[in-house]
Amino acid sequence: MTIRNTDFKHVSYLWDDEKAAELAGDEVALLIYRSNLLGADLRLTNYGGGNTSCKAMAEDPLTGEMKEVMWVKGSGGDLGTLKRSGLAALYVDRLRNLERRYRGLAHEDEMVALFNHCIYDLESKAPSIDTPLHGFLPFKHIDHLHPDAAIAIAASKDGERITQELFGGTIGWVPWQKPGFELGLMLRRCLEENPGIRGIMLGSHGLFTWGETAYESYLNTLEVIEKCADYLEQHYKGAGQAFGGQRLESLKADARRKQAAGIAPVLRGFCSSDRHMVGHFTDDPRVLEFINSSDLGRLAPMGTSCPDHFLRTKISPLVLKLQPSEDLSNVQVLREKLQPEFEAYRAMYAAYYESCKHDDSPPIRDPNPVIILYPGVGMFSFSKDKQTARVAAEFYINAINVMKGAEAISEYTSLPRQEAFNIEYWLLEEAKLQRMPKPKPLTGKIALVTGSAGGIGKAIARKFAEEGAVVLLNDMNQERLSVAATEFEQWYGKDAFATAVLDVTDSAQISEAFNIAACAFGGVDIVVNNAGLSISKTIGDHTEGDWDLLYDVLVKGQFLVTQAAVAVMQKQALGGDILNIVSKNALVSGPNNAGYGSAKAAQLHLSRLNAAELGAEGVRVNVVNPDAVISDSNIWAGGWAEGRAKAYGISVDELPAYYAKRTLLNEVILPDDIANACFAFVGGLLGKSTGNMLNVDGGVAAAFVR
């Protein structure tokens, strides 16, 4: 693959002539290629942001005539992963003729429905609100991006003057206007008044650039953004001087992480007053520079400028008043300190809604903050799922970059509150939200399943992930854990899980696992004590070491993990679920089973004791009793199979059939069967059930409770 080196310093030149030559003659393929290159560099655009287009001649399927068609990124999607199926294709003449139907700014939303009458490809994606922005410009290839370097100029007080001087009149300027039909007409008018320009800066919004070929557009886009970035760099002050200089020092990295893990569950509890939220934490150097600065108090309340940023980060962040090294050990005291801050934020948001709402505005949404800044420590973001929380954090970092650049060259300006509201509560945005799929049962829930790199544990973790939860995968075997992590990323993506090496007999590793869950997701809602082992020996052959190992892993491990889980759940004050994977052996007496069977009985009764104690806090404790789950089990890889076969006077190969035949249903029990039982407890239908036991053993009469 041949990639030319260029002199670009602030953007990446990724164009490959050989690859482009393979696509020659297919303007749509070149559009997708260019889009993917632009989306691969986050300095050019952010996840899901921006849109690109091309215009080319195509045969009308009804008349056979050649017509000009525009392919443009459709509603939703991401440039970096854009495919042909993500494009909308429209007849250009029909789109432009919609101007005859346009009744003015107060009625522009009605134009969106008319876009469907311009569709060329009936299989194409739904056209986005930005469609007319591309349609009313004559160029064959157009890029509309939201690069931080350009928005910093667009969102500065002197943005129009700086744009004129920096580009010598070759970049036009259009003042802020909400995306839509009117903005498309404004872009056309700007071009008519400034013939020969190479692009247009949108006030507080972003950048339009173009070319007659895909390559010309790509290169023009890079050159304009590079020039903006270089201009900002020339105006940045020395280290520690941005944002009025540093007001305080960050904690050391380990201390920041410890504070983040300690406070995240408390923050998550407050942010989940409307519904369960999933969190994300970052102490990126750009975040620390901003939150430790003298200008934080002035800039943070102003909010963001670019609509792409604002829609994901909310009107403004919550800035905590805590000291970086605040003592977080007393949860009650901490909650008392934070309660007024959250109440003030919710009141601010309600006042913003009431002062800006229209007669037809959708009802007020969740008034809790999305972005929370903890000076000296880092930034938290909370949203409906991990990906949305992570992306919100990334967008706020974009906003920080914009503020830094704007302050360096002029003075940062944010969207007026009314304009921000008109975007956030736009009826078209509300309609898009209403079209979103219904959340899965475990959306917003965080699960930690011990021993989840294989066997029953992995099956449970998979079931929870499939039902919308995020999962902390863990195992005491690093190699086994790495394999499971690779599988989960392929199945569910990188945001669905985190990992921790965990030996349930090691208090330090347990604490670290919950800290990882807190920093990765904000806390924990579901804990499944699944890790275990089996030893089958006669009482004479049983050693003291065997006994201690069984009780350390099964009983002490369950106790220690539950203890740590409860501490996190108490911080969140959201209740939770603890599921203990025990065994039918907790109820059934069998040969060669003194250590294992008695440890399982202890696990069962410990579950009852925990249920009795924790019910008042909304923490449910329930038990699933498997039997003879042989598939992919660490237990059966050891000597347990041989021990049980010896006890029953059969061979190891005969065990699966033997276990199935002794059940009332004559069924082999699989890991997925146990996973389904666990989901039954936590999926929402048994929310008022605790202290219960569910046998998943095919029916073993001796294990009946009554």
Image (cartoon, grey):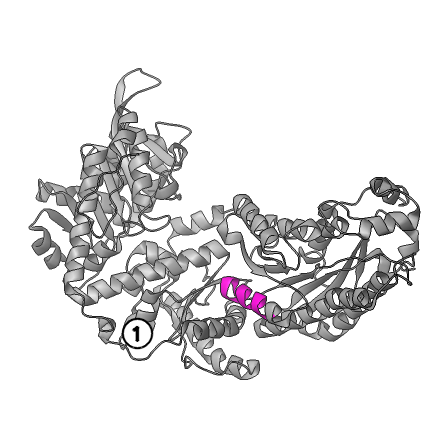
Foreground residue, 678 or 501?
A: 501
Local crowd at mark 1 within 10 Å, few (<14), some, or many (≥20)? some
Is 520 one of the magenta-colored residues? Answer: yes
Q: Which residues are magenta?
A: 511-522
For the point 72% across and 57% down, the residue is: 681
Type of secondary structure dominating the magenta stretch: helix
For the point 22% across and 56% down, the residue is: 149
List x then y, in percent, for residue 226. 18, 51
Vertical order, 422 against 514 (above or below):
above
The residue singled out by tag 1 in the image is 296
Is 375 one of the magenta-colored residues? Answer: no
| Corner quadrant of residue 317 | bottom left
Quadrant location of the C terminus? bottom right
Identify the element where label 1 is drawn.
helix
List x then y, in percent, for residue 208. 21, 45
Foreground residue, 248 or 9?
A: 9
For badge 1, the amino acid type reads Leu
93 left or right of 113 in image: left
Vertical order, 157 against 699 (above or below):
below
Vertical order, 230 against 565 (above or below):
above
Vertical order, 11 against 347 (above or below):
above
529 left or right of 325 in image: right
Quadrant location of the N terminus? top left
List x then y, in percent, for residue 61. 35, 18
17 left or right of 250 in image: left
Outermost residue to the top: 64
46 left or right of 490 in image: left
Foreground residue, 356 or 401?
A: 401
Residue 581, visible in the rendered structure: yes
